[in-house]
Image (cartoon, helix red, strand yellow):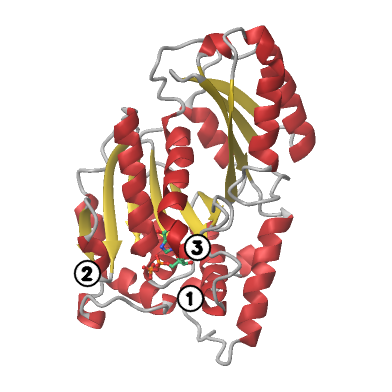
């Protein structure tokens, strides 16, 4: 999927940067352009990306703190500048635009839904969000910000791929210490999804196509990814169990939203040397995925990759009814109720009755 990435806020910029680096190192060429947008000058300076500073007249380059309503306002005021900076980058070959942001802070949390809405108004390609949920250990403000932002973002974007900051976090590291490694994990997994369909190492009948990723994401407003990798034998017949167990691990232990297994649609991508992928294993894994996700719409395909190992990538479309999303929204709601000054002062961007019904 040829993609243009726009990172909003600190996490958005860093994750975008990691995605650009991964795509370049692997030689995939799926990332066709990238831009970082922030209200804090300091967070933009450390990035090797083209940047746009928003809200200078309101916050003088100092950021919006954790105020996501201010984040939404400064994006709204300067969205024209962001759109001008994108001019010429979103060429005819772009198949999708991704807005990347952490939902717990201010600039990304408030700005991403505003930007997604404007992008949808102007461009005809799908506008997706890659959104990071705060971990459980983060404070109430982060949970409240993320709850409000998620509902709005899920409504504005064509699909919002959610990554829980607790999901790919190695034990023994604090969340902050772990950001760089979490960002690498996000880049590897999302980078593979973007590259799947670009068919880098040759084509075959069972090679996955970009349209299959798009159709899977189309089935709902919130999506998740699963990933696992395993050693494989040279002989595909010896890899039946390798394929089935790597697919199981991708869904059961490797998803970006832990325990989100119920989905409207799913796509199983097997990445590795095509002559090592057991067809019987792939078929069984797909059947199993149908049962486990409760979806009748499970697609599958190979991603030919010159690697000694076999990886399974699972794209889950339409996970909004999963326990994990409900649990998170409940956590955000409780945090908001505990908040001394629940701020529901009527910013239209954060009125989200439509999604309340959906969820
Ligand atoms: P903003 O600059 O105002 O948009 O705020 P941040 O991007 O710092 O958003 C804060 C949220 O993003 C919090 O929930 C953090 O846990 C998370 N976050 C901040 N930096 C990173 C990062 O580099 N990687 C990841 N995965 N999450 C981050």
Query: Based on the displayed image, in which of its 4 quarters is residue 298 positioned?
Result: top right
Along the polypeptide, which appears first: circle 2 or circle 1? 2
Query: Based on the displayed image, in which of its 4 quarters is residue 219 positioned?
Result: top right
Mark closer to the observer (3, 2): 3
Q: Is mark 3 within 8 Å of ligand 1?
A: yes
Which residue has dot 1 on it? 348
| Numbered badge on residue 175 | 3
Residue at 56 percent across and 14 percent down: it is 206
Along the polypeptide, which appears first: circle 1 or circle 3? 3
> Under tag 3, what secondary structure?
helix
Measured Cα–Cα span from mark 1 to mark 3: 33 Å
Vertical relation: 317 (above or below) 7: above
Question: What percent of the width, then of the height, locates residue 107?
Answer: 37, 70
Q: Residue furthest bottom?
A: 340
Along the polypeptide, which appears first: circle 3 or circle 2? 2
> Under tag 2, what secondary structure?
helix
Measured Cα–Cα span from mark 2 to mark 1: 28 Å
* Label 3: few (<14), some (14–19) or many (≥20) C-alpha neighbours in 10 Å: some
In the picture, measured across the screen, residue 22 lies left or right of residue 322, that is: left
Q: Is residue 274 visible?
A: yes
Quadrant in which the N terminus appears: top left
Measured Cα–Cα span from mark 3 to mark 2: 24 Å
Quadrant in which the C terminus appears: bottom right
Which residue has dot 2 on it? 41
């Amino acid at each position: 999927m040829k993609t243009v990435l726009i990172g909003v806020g600190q996490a958005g910029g860093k994750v975008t940067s990691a995605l650009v680096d991964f795509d370049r190192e692997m030689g995939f060429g799926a990332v066709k352009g990238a831009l970082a947008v922030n209200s804090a000058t300091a967070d933009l300076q450390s990035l090797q990306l083209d940047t746009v500073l928003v809200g200078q007249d309101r916050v003088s380059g100092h950021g919006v703190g954790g105020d996501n309503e201010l984040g939404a306002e400064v994006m709204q005021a300067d969205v024209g500048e962001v759109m001008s900076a994108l001019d010429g980058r979103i060429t005819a070959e772009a198949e999708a635009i991704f807005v990347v942001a952490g939902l717990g802070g201010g600039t990304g949390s408030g700005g991403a839904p505003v930007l997604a809405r404007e992008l949808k108004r102007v461009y005809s390609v799908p506008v997706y969000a890659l959104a990071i949920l705060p971990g459980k250990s983060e404070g109430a403000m982060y949970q409240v910000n993320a709850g409000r932002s998620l509902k709005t973002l899920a409504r504005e974007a064509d699909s919002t791929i959610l990554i829980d900051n607790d999901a790919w976090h190695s034990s023994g590291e604090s969340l902050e210490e772990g950001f760089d490694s979490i960002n690498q994990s996000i880049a590897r997994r999302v980078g593979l999804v973007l590259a799947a369909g670009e068919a880098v190492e040759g084509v075959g009948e069972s090679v996955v196509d970009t349209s299959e990723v798009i159709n899977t994401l189309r089935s709902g407003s919130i999506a998740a990814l699963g990933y696992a990798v395993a050693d494989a034998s040279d002989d595909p017949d010896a890899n039946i169990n390798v394929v089935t167990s790597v697919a199981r691990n991708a869904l059961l232990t490797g998803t970006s939203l832990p325990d989100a297994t119920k989905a409207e649609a799913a796509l199983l991508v097997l990445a590795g040397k095509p002559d090592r992928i057991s067809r019987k294993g792939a078929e069984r894994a797909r059947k199993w995925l149908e049962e486990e996700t409760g979806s009748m719409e499970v697609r599958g395909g190979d991603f030919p990759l010159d690697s000694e190992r076999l990886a399974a990538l699972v794209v889950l479309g339409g996970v909004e009814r999963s326990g994990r999303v409900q649990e998170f929204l409940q956590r955000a709601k409780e945090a908001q109720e505990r908040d001394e000054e629940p701020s529901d002062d009527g910013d239209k961007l954060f009125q989200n009755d439509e999604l309340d019904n959906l969820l």
